[in-house]
Amino acid sequence: MNEAALGLAGENTAIGDAIGLAVKRLGQQNANSRVLILMTDGANTAGEIAPLKAAELAANTKLKIYTIGIGADEMIVRSFFGSRKVNPSADLDEDSLIKIAESTGGHYYRARNAQELENIYLRLDELEPVTSDKQYFRPHSELFYWPLAVALVLLGLLCLLRLRT
């Protein structure tokens, strides 16, 4: 979450399409329990499938959906002209998220900060324990620039020494 940025996934939110894709992908797995964690900060604003219709398809395939609404209720934005309060979660469609979760046997959670989100994931780990190996995503930063820069500087110094002699 520390590396997430606004607009990373685009301007629109296609909740129904995301659920449909999960139904397709998870439907191929032979598991006793299939679970989807749907985390969003807004409402469905794009996509071909309505979220509630997609949730109905998920329920038919025994895919349980836990929904998480993220975003603070109130935030102070400072600017050149002073500060003002804004609600970054104004677009959050909690009613739909509750209906999606309940229709599939899941539950809706609300995370207003990073600590609440961590507590939700701990709760989900208790509700839906994973018996397979955990998969980790470790983003990497490219560091080859540093040795390349040192090599180029040394090459430049070597060329200068050769020109002097």
Image (tube, rainbow, N blue to C red):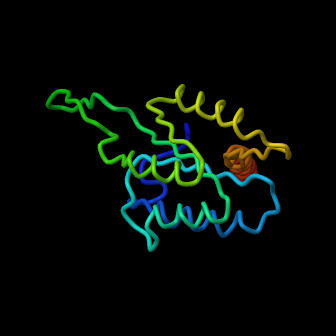
Q: Residue furthest right?
A: 132
Q: Residue furthest bottom?
A: 48
Horizontally, residue 157 falls left or right of residue 119, namely right
Q: On the image, which quarter does residue 94 sit in?
A: top left
Q: At 25% across and 29% down in the image, what residue appears? A: 78
Q: At 38% across and 33% down in the image, what residue appears? A: 72
Depth order, front residue of 75/31: 31
Q: At 48% across and 33% down in the image, what residue appears? A: 111
Horizontally, residue 37 falls left or right of residue 46, namely right
Horizontally, residue 19 falls left or right of residue 113, namely right
Depth order, front residue of 60/69: 60
Depth order, front residue of 2/14: 14
Specify the quadrant that holds the N terminus.
top right
Horizontally, residue 11 falls left or right of residue 53, namely left
Q: At 49% across and 53% down in the image, what residue appears? A: 100
Question: Residue 7 at x, y = what percent?
Answer: 42, 53
Question: Residue 48 at x, y = what percent?
Answer: 44, 74
Depth order, front residue of 32/159: 32
Q: Residue furthest left?
A: 81
Question: Residue 58 at x, y = what percent?
Answer: 60, 62
76 w.r.t. 134: above or below: above
Q: On the image, which quarter does residue 154 sit in?
A: top right
Can see residue 49?
Answer: yes
Question: Residue 36 at x, y = what percent?
Answer: 63, 52
110 w.r.t. 138: above or below: above
Q: How many marks?
A: 0
Can see residue 153?
Answer: no
